Amino acid sequence: MASKKLRLFLAGSTLVEVLIAMIVIVVVFSMAMVIFSNVTRSAPSIIKVRAQKVLDKVLDETEQNKIFTPGNKSYELDGFTIEESVMPYDGNNSLYQITLTASANSRDSIMTIKKIVSK
């Protein structure tokens, strides 16, 4: 008789055990959701990556040509509006600061690159 009671007692879980297990599962899933949302929010968007590649390409071409005309110019390239600014750096005629800004439409700046180059 005692062995039957012991078997019946071991066969199931109490309501408290089930509730504790559910609370642990909910806490783990909520932590996973927070981590997932932080990772997706901090990841760069495809547009930013494309803008970075376009600006890197323009900067490489500008450095290879070695033609640094001080001033500002704006042009369209690969669906972005590129604003290029070339200025002498710190009054030195052999150093120039190049600032490139990519924007999807004329008012939303997506990416900016600044670099100091020598002539």
Image (cartoon, helix red, strand yellow):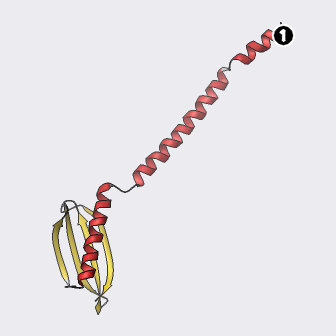
Residue linked to disc 1: 2
Instruction: Give the camera-side residue of 10 and 18.
Output: 10
Q: Quadrant of the N terminus?
A: top right
Q: Residue at x 23, y 78 (%)?
A: 85
Measured from the top left, where is residue 14 in percent x and y? Answer: 68, 20
Measuring 79% from the left and 9% from the top, which residue is drawn there? 4
Residue 68 position, x and y percent, is 22, 85
Q: Nearer the viewer, residue 64 or 41?
A: 64
Viewer-side residue, 57 vs 43 = 57
The quadrant in which residue 59 appears is: bottom left
Q: Residues within 10 Å of mark 1 (few under 14, many from 20)?
A: few
Camera-nearest residue between 105 and 118: 118
Q: Residue type at mark 1?
A: Ala
**Left or right relative to 104: residue 18:** right
Image quadrant holding the C terminus, namely: bottom left
- Percent x, y of residue 20: 64, 29
Percent position of residue 39, x then y? 45, 51
Is residue 81 positioned above or below 17 on the image?
below
The image shows residue 21, relative to residue 108, as above or below, that is above
Query: What residue is at 41 percent from the left and 55 percent from the top?
Result: 42
Q: Is residue 97 left or right of residue 73?
A: right
Q: Quadrant of residue 95?
A: bottom left
Up the image or down, 41 lies above or below 100; here it is: above
Residue, far front: 64
